[in-house]
Structure formats: structure tokens, C-alpha cells
Amino acid sequence: MGQCTAKPLREFESASHDLSALGALGSLLGAKDDIKEGMTTLAKLTRQLDEEWETEAKFMGDVSDAFDLLEVLLTAVARAKKG
């Protein structure tokens, strides 16, 4: 899952460390730290979502495998009853 978000996340995190454009605007100087903190928080949340999605994808794969096995077992039982 993280393959899709790795590059944009790296670029986003990099941008959060270079907010020099805001320094030119005096009224936003106080907001610079808040913006950097917000961007850092968003990057952390994105990494957590990647981990959660990866866990959910693995779980769905495990459930799918279990249903495949159940189908094989039910087919074997049905054949055994016929024979």
C-alpha cells in the first residue's frame, strides 16, 4: 500500500521543512510553526493509514484463503457423499 504514497509523502514532508515562502509574509510568520506542525501530523497520519490498509489487505487475503479452503473441503465432502 505504501508504494502509492511513499513518494508524495516524502515530497510533502520535505516541503514541511522548507516553509521559507511564508517568511516573506510578515502576517504569516506566526502561522509558520503551526503549518509545519500540521503538515508533520498529516504525514504521520498518512503513514498510519498505510499501515492500517496493509493490515486490512492481509486480513482480507487471509479471509479469502479461508473461503477457498472451505470451498475445497465442501466439494470433497459432497464428492464423498456421492461415492
Image: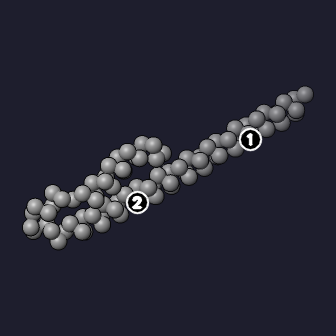
- The three-letter code of the residue at mark 1 reads Leu
Mark 1 or mark 2, which has the lower sequence index?
A: 2
Give the answer, above or below, for where 26 lies relative to 68: below
Residue at point 32%, 49% (across, down): 11
Residue picked out by circle 1: 70
In this view of the protein, which residue sits in the foreground, 35 or 54? 35
Mark 2 surroundings: few (<14), some (14-19) or many (≥20) residues within 10 A = few
Q: Quick one: SS at disc 1?
A: helix
In the image as oriented, which residue stretches furthest toward the top?
83
Left-right relation of 34 to 25: right
Q: Position of residue 31 (x, y in %)?
A: 19, 68
Left-right relation of 63 to 31: right
Using the rendered view, name the quadrant where residue 74 is placed. top right
Using the rendered view, name the quadrant where residue 70 is placed. top right
Q: Position of residue 9 (x, y in %)?
A: 36, 50
Residue at point 42%, 42% (across, down): 4
- The three-letter code of the residue at mark 2 reads Leu
Mark 1 surroundings: few (<14), some (14-19) or many (≥20) residues within 10 A = few
Q: Position of residue 59 (x, y in %)?
A: 60, 49
- For the residues labelled 1 and 2, the Cα–Cα distance comes to 37 Å
In this view of the protein, which residue sits in the foreground, 77 or 60? 60
Give the answer, above or below, for where 63 lies relative to 79: below
Q: How many marks?
A: 2
Q: Quick one: SS at disc 2?
A: helix
* Marker disc for residue 45: 2
